[in-house]
Amino acid sequence: MQISFAAMPKTGPLASGSGTLVLGALEGPKLAHETDSGLSAILTRAMTAAGFKGKPGQMVEILAPSGSKRSRILIAGLGKAENINTAIADMIGATVTGKLLDRETEVTFAIEVPKKAKISDGEFAAHLAFGAQMRSYRFDLYRTAPRDEKPTLAKVTIATAEGATARKDWEELSAVGEGIFWARDLVNEPPNVLYPEEFARRTKVLAKLGVKVEILNVAHMQKLGMNSLLSVGWGSARPSALVVMQWSGAPKGKKTAPVAFIGKGVCFDSGGLSLKPAGSMVGMKGDMAGAATVVGVMHALARRKARVNAVGVIGLVENMPDGAALRPNDVVTSMSGKTVEVLNTDAEGRLVLADALWYTQSRFKPRFMINLATLTGAIVTALGLEHAGLFSNDDALSAQLSEVGTAEGELVWRLPLSDAYDKLLRSKIADMKNIGGPAAGSITAAQFLQRFVNNVPWAHLDIAGVAWQDGEQKALIPSWSTGWGVRLLNRLVAEHYEG
Ligand code: BES
Ligand code: MN
Ligand code: ZN
């Protein structure tokens, strides 16, 4: 799908061009585009007949009048002028694309944004493009026959009075979009294809964008003492790996300590010897979504040449049962020197992150560490599929994440940490055990991680409920995997850590 921007048609939008024309209508409904009175009358009649009120998300479709080269006209509801924002533009771009994907070849958006709107005409146009891009995502690598109609929509043109702004914003947004597609692809891949070393290998393409990529193999990690991470892979036929990605975009002489993103990359989580029941194992190819998001964020930052130094560290393992597998009751010594009594091998994500966090803070002394992990089923019980769980030792970082999350539509909700919860991790024979009791499962998992964080601002995002979707599909996410977190973290950097 090719996306481009053009000037607003001066003569009346039906005078030229082919394919579907998309116009906007404010709540009322009231057409947002000045057009000739003949066409106005036709559109007004159609809106009335359809009971269309111009609310965001509402849409009317009519066949283009004879004499026009257009095939049809779509009127998209914009809502109240003063409420028009990027989310509405994203949604319209995505919804229209979804509607036309397999029954049209060309579409032109000619929506005029009123002055009263929260965003400019150029920004609106760029976000229409972003919505269209998001909705065009597909993962058909393993189909030999198309599931439904083949996509035909090849050309998307967005008319705007502010082409320069639109193109500039789109350059940034499409970089983020590419990062999201990367993350989605990695999460959708089956685990027999995307095992730890293959995942690591795929991160190397980031080098083309100027990202330094290092892959640490098992021997290297053994030398570093990463036995907590490595123990998870003991039962797997696939060797574990750790990938370190560095983007150095900060202007010379500016703050050079990097921001750091750390991801849980369990390429398949069977539970290990504490084996999951069959039903719970399905979907556990996605247990590397935290790592995928980190790759997606690094891609976005590098692609848009973000003025920041950033590191991404991902721990890649496969959690399997086997004669050599980690046992409940085993004690492992982590890179920090702290010992962990493993009482449940299905609480493996925290074992991976313990060493990845420790390594990141020791080597990079980062400005902050944010880790992402599909860490606990309990977070789905607590927050459902709407918010990711946020745990943090830093109120400022936490507030930034909450704010940015709301703006980007990737919501987070903070849950507590305290000594009282930390006590639940006391072990009878080692420094800690890897599970708490039956209560507060997401919090005790976060407490476990915090034991591997020193005096660094840190946030843990438990994304078990938002990394993929088994139920209803969202307008911008036509896929099982969501790519959740790429937008959030990219915007966090853009708003607070660049320059
Ligand atoms: N990867 C799972 C968490 C998970 C569950 C993610 C459901 C997405 C959907 C994690 O490794 C796990 O198994 N956690 C256990 C922890 C328990 C053993 C303390 C869980 O949530 O049951
Ligand atoms: Mn598990
Ligand atoms: Zn897991």
Image (cartoon, grey):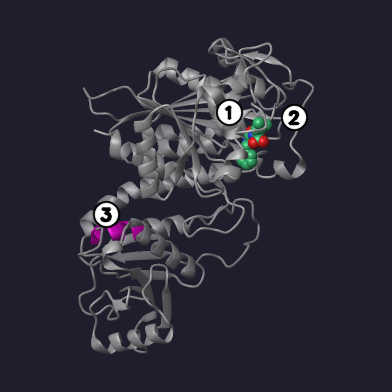
Q: Is residue 48 above or below residue 266?
A: below
Q: Earlier in the sequence, mark 1 or mark 3?
A: 3
Q: CA distance from mark 1 to mark 3?
A: 46 Å
Q: Main secondary structure of the magenta part?
A: helix
Residue that numbered label 1 is attached to: 444
Could you tell me if the residues under marks 3 and 2 are in contact, i.e. CB atoms within 8 Å? no
Residue that numbered label 3 is attached to: 167
Q: Earlier in the sequence, mark 1 or mark 2?
A: 2
Mark 1 or mark 2, whichever is nearer to me: 1
Q: CA distance from mark 1 to mark 2?
A: 18 Å
Is 123 contained in the magenta span?
A: yes
Q: Type of residue at label 3?
A: Arg
Mark 1 or mark 3, whichever is nearer to me: 1
Which x, y percent locates residue 477?
50, 55
- Secondary structure of residue under mark 2: loop
- Secondary structure of residue under mark 3: helix
> Magenta residues?
120-129
Residue that numbered label 2 is attached to: 274
Q: Quadrant of the C terminus?
A: top left
Relative to 140, 158 lies left or right: left
Relative to 119, 278 lies left or right: right
- Secondary structure of residue under mark 1: helix
Which x, y percent locates residue 325?
74, 22
Q: Which mark is residue 95?
A: none
- Asked if ligand 1 lies within 8 A of label 1, the reply is yes
- Asked if ligand 1 lies within 8 A of label 2, the reply is yes
